[in-house]
Image (cartoon, grey):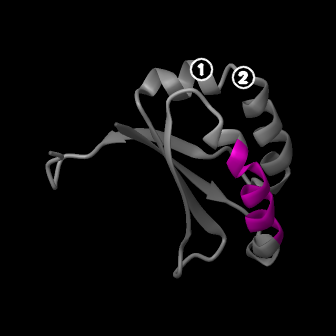
Amino acid sequence: MIFEIAQIEIDQQRGAAFEAVVAEAEPLFRAAKGFRSFELTRSIEHPGRYRLTIGWVSVEAHTVDFRGSADFERWRSLAGPFFLEAPIVEHVRQILPQQA
């Protein structure tokens, strides 16, 4: 499994509305081919900074399958208005602890 980590910067005063939109959009991710997990975290030191971490079976499940879908377009239409800048997105693979 790989993880997509999207760092998202918003106006911290709009945090509750952004969190509601992400909760509304969560089923779009869960329905996606290759989806494995979903987590949204908020920085304590920088309250306008969120990290959306999505587990996928492969990078392609995210970059090809999900990003090429209508559900991705819906996600962007819901969340996009909150973004102060384009999210910083990277893919990572867990190294430790080792998976059984």
Spatial distance from mark 2 to mark 1, Cα to Cα?
Answer: 6 Å
Q: Which residues are magenta?
A: 17-27
Q: Which residue sits at x=62%, y=77%?
A: 47
Q: Secondary structure at mark 1?
A: helix
Q: Amino acid at mark 2?
A: Ser
Q: Which residue sits at x=73%, y=57%?
A: 22
Mark 1 crowd level (few <14, some 14–19, many ≥20, 10 Å Cα): some
Q: Nearer the viewer, residue 20 or 10?
A: 20
Q: Which residue is mark 1?
A: 65
Q: Quadrant of the C terminus?
A: top left
Q: Quadrant of the N terminus?
A: top left
Q: Amino acid at mark 1?
A: Asp
Q: Secondary structure at mark 2?
A: loop
Q: Which residue is mark 2?
A: 69
Query: Residue 91 — which label?
Result: none
- Residue 90 percent location from the top left of the image: 45, 40
- Residue 37 percent location from the top left of the image: 49, 48
Q: Is residue 58 left or right of residue 23?
A: left
- Residue 59 percent location from the top left of the image: 43, 27
